[in-house]
Image (spheres, rainbow, N blue to C red):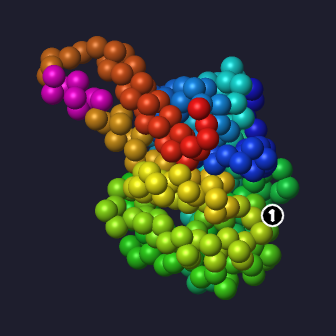
Amino acid sequence: MPLVSGHEVIAKCTEEKLVAGAFNTTNIETTMGIVEAIERTGVPTFIQVAPTNAVLSGFDYIYDMVSRRLADCPVPVALHLDHGKSIQPVKDALAAKFTSIMIDASEEPYEENVRVSQIARDLCGPEISLEAELGSIGGKEDDHGPEIANSTDPSQVADFIAKVGCDMLAVSVGNVHGYSPDARIDFDLLSKVREASSVPLVIHGGSGLPEEQLARLGEFGVVKVNVASDLRNAMIRSFGEAYNANPDEVSLIRVSKQSVNAIADVVERRIRMFNPSVN
Ligand SMILES: [Zn+2]
């Protein structure tokens, strides 16, 4: 089916008590692997790309590749901008027909975060879903992410959502980008944020969290969990292993297809971790 708006993924997941994975693509192998896993599980999903990962291709290429692959996929999928750090990438992703947007001005002072996020809201209009971030999620992934994490302050949540009008809120509650041994969800804090929030929550840093924590997120109003490092590592590992096995290997297509399978397996495993009820 054609790409759907993020609103539709959120609504379907809420209705069916599911948690959408949000998987970062970079190239055709990651896209093919992600969609293969979506088809295996049937869970509505976000495919996303951050501006830092679209430097080789650009948003138009990502749109063409993702929408072409999804044309015969029966599961609703939205194409999402991950970590739009300013207004320009938001405009660029909307121009490339992305169907969901994240504005991340979370490293700015509170009032500035509100102001920038409001501009993104106006640009998205009612059709395109908007994720905004309150509190900074730590850890580095490629070259984005702050040096210092700031936990989400529950006392700011209701005011922020009312002023911005975002459809999802990314929160910093112990989650960290990438692989971090320190990543642990603080469920007390997550509960307080959830009580204050009128919109579903988003957890970034899904690659580094323990399985038993990922399985509980749906009970705490979380509708979207981002995973990037896991997929990238799966692809790089496939090529590394092929080279180690045979430094004279020249069948790029064979190794590329192996990497697609490795990515699909990683994504499927994550989707099932977020949704223990899915068979
Ligand atoms: Zn993130």
- Residue 85 position, x and y percent, is 56, 64
- Residue 214 position, x and y percent, is 50, 54
Query: Three-letter amino acid code at disc 1?
Result: Asp
- Residue 165 position, x and y percent, is 79, 68
Asked if one can make out residue 106 in the rendered structure from this viewpoint, the answer is: no
Query: Magenta stretch?
Result: 238-245
Q: Residue at x 28, y 29 (%)?
A: 239
Q: Residue at x 55, y 47 (%)?
A: 274
Badge 1 local density, few (<14 within 10 Å), some, or many (20+)?
few
Which image quadrant for residue 279? Answer: top right
Residue behind mark 1: 122
- Residue 64 position, x and y percent, is 63, 30
Q: Residue at x 36, y 34 (%)?
A: 235
Could you tell whether 75 is left or right of 38 in the image? Answer: right
Main secondary structure type of the part rendered in magenta: helix
Look at the image and tell me in which quarter the N terminus lies: top right
Q: Is residue 240 magenta?
A: yes
